[in-house]
Amino acid sequence: MTNSNLSLETLKSENFTLQSRLTAKNRRILEKMFRYIRTFPLDEYHVELIHQDLIGMAKEAELRQESFPGTLGKAPLSFCDDLLLASGQISPPAGRSLLRISSLYYRFIGTFFAIIGLSNIIGQILGFLVGGEIWILKIMSGDKIVLFLYQLFVLAVGILYQLGGDRAKRYSSNSSKSNCCLKWGFFLLLLQIV
């Protein structure tokens, strides 16, 4: 085992013991911050050093009997962005909040399209069944098949928008997948224009 591996393992064990001494609330906050920092392409040693600094800050806040988020002065994840920027290791990508907002928009639009498409398909099927004819045969008559295919298309677009919203939310906290998210957004924007 090399010195760097030994020091990394030592650092991990120290961080574990230090973090286990904190209150449950501060441990949860630190876990969220640590998970967020792990989304950046840093080597594990630097991640553990940042983790140790954050544990030290939480311990100091407990000694002063103050809340840990209150001592940070801002939201914990925003503080992590500033910490990463100040460390010079990496710069956090801009637009994470924009991705979260767009994920809500695409999920809303997708849910709307999916509900409309599904309810119209179910309505058509029930209408055909109540009408007394086999709905497959009735669908095959001219305008009915076009309407049915249109409703299937609306349902598919709704599902596609839901997937786009899910990916935007998932990738808003992962800097390495932001390029894929931009491609999804561009594709959905083109689909919306068409």
Image (spheres, grey):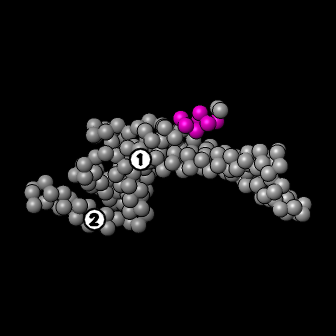
Q: Nearer the viewer, residue 150 or 13?
A: 150
Where is mark 2, residue-wise? 16
- Cβ atoms under marks 1 and 2 closer than 8 Å: no
Would you identify the image quadrant in which residue 157 lies?
A: top right
Relative to residue 54, is residue 175 depicted above or below? above
Give the side of residue 170 with respect to residue 87, left or right. right
Q: Nearer the viewer, residue 180 or 60?
A: 180
Quadrant including the N terminus: bottom left
Q: Position of residue 2 (x, y in %)?
A: 9, 57
Asked if residue 138 lies in the magenta stretch, the reply is no
Residue at the spot x=90%, y=60% of the render? 131
Badge 1 element = loop
Q: Please provide the residue range marked out in magenta.
A: 186-192
Residue at the spot x=52%, y=40% of the render? 184
Q: Position of residue 69 (x, y in %)?
A: 43, 52
Q: Disc 1 to disc 2, how far (Cα)?
A: 24 Å
Q: Dot 2: within a 10 Å radius of its alpha carbon, few (fewer than 14), some, or many (20 or more) residues?
A: some
Where is mark 1, residue-wise? 174
Would you identify the image quadrant in which residue 23 lies?
A: bottom left
Asked if residue 188 lies in the magenta stretch, the reply is yes
Q: Position of residue 67 (x, y in %)?
A: 43, 56
Badge 2 element = helix
Q: Nearer the viewer, residue 97 or 22?
A: 97
Residue at the spot x=38%, y=62% of the render? 27
Residue at the spot x=73%, y=45% of the render? 150
Give the side of residue 3 with respect to residue 126, left or right. left
Is residue 89 visible in the rendered image? The answer is yes
Relative to residue 131, is residue 176 depicted above or below? above
Give the side of residue 32 with respect to residue 147, left or right. left
Would you identify the image quadrant in which residue 52 lies?
A: bottom left
Quadrant including the C terminus: top right
